[in-house]
Image (spheres, rainbow, N blue to C red):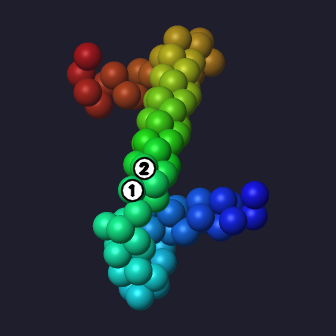
Amino acid sequence: MRTSLIEIERIDQWLLNQDAPASHLLMDARLVLDPVLRSNVRDQKTSHDLIRRYGRQKLINEIRKVEHHLFTADQHRSFRDKVKSIFNF
């Protein structure tokens, strides 16, 4: 269990370019030689990508909620009018 956690951490550091140059070079060599490690790195990169996309989508949804609230709530009428006057719409 501990070994796999260490491996995950090493892969994360490599993927995020947070490891030392010597460690990065060593990981590059291990990737050439170890097909299981290559597969693990590919899977972890896919996980990173999915998490990043999820976070972006969540942020977009939150921004849309704020935008909807600002442009529909009566209490923000003066703000809405100022924005409309700036962009003339």
- Give yes or no for contact between labels 1 and 2 (Cβ–Cβ under 8 Å): yes
Determine the residue located farthest toward the left in the rendered image. 88
Q: Which residue does the numbered mark 2 point to in the structure image?
A: 39
Mark 1, Cα crowd under 10 Å, few <14 / some 14-19 / many 20+, is few
C-alpha distance separating marks 1 and 2: 6 Å
Above or below: residue 84 compared with residue 15? above
Q: Which residue does the numbered mark 1 point to in the structure image?
A: 35
- Residue 70 in sight here: no
Give the foreground label among 1 and 2.
1
Q: Residue at x 35, y 72 (%)?
A: 28
- Left or right for 89, reference 22: left
Q: Secondary structure at mark 1?
A: helix
Q: Mark 2 is on which residue type?
A: Ser
Q: Quadrant of the C terminus?
A: top left
Residue 51: percent from left, percent from top: 52, 40
Q: Mark 1 is on which residue type?
A: Pro
Residue 50: percent from left, percent from top: 47, 37
Residue 53: percent from left, percent from top: 44, 36
